[in-house]
Image (cartoon, coloured by chain):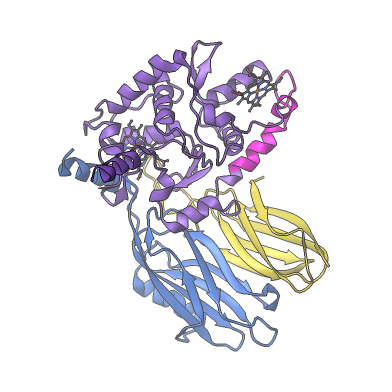
Chain colours: A purple, B blue, C yellow
């Protein structure tokens, strides 16, 4: 009996990818690069990665042979701004400083494409959030934001994604709300989108006002999501309903 | 959280769905008659692989396979797919010849709501064959406003 | 130019049936959806997809608004001769795009 209890609690502590909550057919679509529409963005990202840009007329590929494993470590601590930075922000930084090119808007097609191409190089690798003490305050704020009730429905992320994970909301199954599949081809969007866009949807879903893309609040939640999902395999570009 | 809160979330999602004038099963039947020239297709030879339960009707993967030797003398000339309750009954019509090798078509379709999907195959001997599948569409919860 | 993903073998044995999978980036705006101001957005879809093998049509599909955005189409053809497969998507607003792939048949 004691063993059984132990097993149950261990199992509950293991993070569970939202992919497992999808139909067999959508799992197959995600796994098949020739049917996963997100691969259109990955291909575009690859082209952009090899294109000389900005006043420096440098391509990402001139400096980076590959970026395998990098996406598993984001958000990370950014020395320059002394703040956490997510992968899209890091790409922007290289674009501004190393390519001397105009910034790309958050959620713009080229930035999504670059992020998809970079993240895909980590596909199958476990999320490995950095053990960096400088991230601790932001991580704590992220967890607080996750547990804070918000919106006209007065619900916290945790109330759905911890307390109700595995149950249904209307007809939709509530997943754990893991972050291992971004950028993601969400069928609802019929396009590729970032984790921030997904978080925005959940905020709007409880009728809360969502901060603008790029806000620190998102990076903090992203930090916490990476921590609670540590070990999950990167699935980007994932497919989700 | 209580039931009412959940219901509110679900209602929210429902309210945000665009309402469109939907086709009817009669429209589907008429479209099939137009495709076959009035011939009533026989049941069989056509296999329609489509998920019975769909989490989001925006992208529904499906595959149609027709049993045929695909020779010059005996092959599938067309496969057409019809729905009952999207705004229009036609989904896709594919033309085949013996050079296809196999009578197979896979695509991603949209489904406005739960309904029956019918696949019809036209053969080189002038016969028509069909099958149908029911698909239940559920809704995504946290959608964009 | 819309982004296209084509998956097919570069070479095949003569007579082999090869599978061809295609994705193209396109909104497939159905013509039934209201925009933000409430008026219906005009239809903008791909209406036809054609695959030629050395100039001969081997597969064609007429698409409707019920095909999902970023259309995926998969079909087969017999590898007959070394040559060129060409793929053409045509649609509303004079949309037209062609991609070609060489195939070696042994």
Residue B115 visible, this angle: yes
Residue A193 place in picture, x, y as percent: 49, 37
Q: State the residue in front, B144 or C96.
A: B144
- Residue A86 lies left or right of residue B14; in this view the side is right
Residue A72 position, x and y percent, is 53, 31
For the record, the magenta segment spans: A41-63
Viewer-nearest residue: C21 or C69: C21
Whether residue C28 is visible here, answered yes or no, is no
Q: Residue at x 28, y 43 (%)?
A: A3
B121 above or below A53?
below
Q: Is residue C51 left or right of residue A236?
A: right
Q: Quick one: A76 or B72, which is closer to the camera?
A: A76
Residue A27 image point, x, y percent: 47, 53
Residue at position x 50%, y 44% from top? A238
The mark total stands at 0
Q: Quadrant of residue B106?
A: bottom right
Residue B118 on image: x %, y %: 43, 73
User: In the picture shown, does residue C38 fall above or below A28?
Assistant: above
Up the image or down, C44 lies above or below A126; here it is below
Left or right, C100 with respect to B46, comes to: right
**Residue C20 falls inside the magenta stretch:** no
Which of the 4 quarters of the picture holds residue C82?
Answer: bottom right
Q: Residue at x 33, y 51 (%)?
A: B139
Judged left or right of residue C30, residue B143 is: left
Which residue extends farthest front?
Answer: A2
């Amino acid at each position: 009996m004691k063993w059984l209890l132990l097993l149950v609690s261990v199992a509950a502590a293991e993070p569970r990818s939202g992919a497992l909550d999808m139909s067999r057919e959508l799992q197959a679509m995600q796994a098949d690069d020739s049917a996963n529409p997100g691969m259109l963005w990955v291909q575009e990202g690859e082209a952009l990665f090899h294109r000389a840009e900005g006043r420096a007329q440098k391509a990402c590929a001139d400096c980076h042979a590959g970026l395998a494993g990098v996406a598993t470590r984001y958000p990370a601590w950014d020395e320059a701004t002394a703040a956490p930075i997510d992968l899209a922000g890091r790409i922007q930084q290289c674009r501004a400083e190393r390519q001397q090119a105009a910034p790309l808007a958050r959620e713009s097609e080229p930035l999504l494409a670059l992020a998809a191409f970079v993240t895909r190089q980590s596909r199958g690798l476990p999320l490995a959030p950095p053990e960096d003490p400088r991230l601790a305050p932001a991580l704590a704020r992220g967890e607080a934001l996750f547990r804070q009730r918000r919106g006209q429905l007065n619900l916290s992320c945790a109330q759905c994604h911890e307390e109700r994970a595995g149950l249904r909301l209307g007809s939709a199954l509530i997943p754990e709300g893991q972050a291992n599949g971004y950028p993601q081809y969400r069928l609802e969007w019929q396009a590729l989108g970032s984790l921030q866009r997904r978080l925005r949807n959940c905020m709007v879903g409880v009728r809360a006002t969502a901060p603008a893309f790029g806000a620190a609040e998102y990076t903090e939640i992203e930090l916490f999501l990476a921590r609670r999902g540590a070990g999950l395999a990167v699935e980007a570009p994932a497919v989700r309903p | 959280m209580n039931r009412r809160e959940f219901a509110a979330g679900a209602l929210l999602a429902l309210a945000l769905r665009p309402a469109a004038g939907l086709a009817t099963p009669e429209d589907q039947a008429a479209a099939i008659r137009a495709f076959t020239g009035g011939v009533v297709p026989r049941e069989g030879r056509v296999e329609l692989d489509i998920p019975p339960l769909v989490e989001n009707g925006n992208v529904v993967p499906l595959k149609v396979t027709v049993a045929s030797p695909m020779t010059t003398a005996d092959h599938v000339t067309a496969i057409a797919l019809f729905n009952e309750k999207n705004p229009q009954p036609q989904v896709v019509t594919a033309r085949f010849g013996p050079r296809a090798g196999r009578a197979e078509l896979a695509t991603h379709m949209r489904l406005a709501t739960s309904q029956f999907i019918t696949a019809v195959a036209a053969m080189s001997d002038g016969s028509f064959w069909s099958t149908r599948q029911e698909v239940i569409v559920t809704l995504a919860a946290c959608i964009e406003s | 130019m819309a982004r296209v993903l084509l998956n097919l073998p570069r070479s095949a044995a003569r007579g082999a049936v090869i599978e061809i999978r295609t994705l193209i980036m396109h909104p497939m705006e159905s013509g039934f959806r209201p925009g933000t101001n409430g008026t219906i957005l005009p239809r903008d879809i791909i209406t036809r997809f054609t695959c030629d093998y050395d100039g001969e049509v081997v597969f064609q599909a007429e698409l409707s608004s019920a095909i999902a955005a970023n259309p995926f189409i998969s079909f087969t053809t017999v590898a007959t001769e070394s040559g060129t497969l060409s793929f053409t998507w045509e649609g509303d607003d004079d949309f037209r795009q062609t991609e070609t792939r060489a195939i070696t048949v042994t």
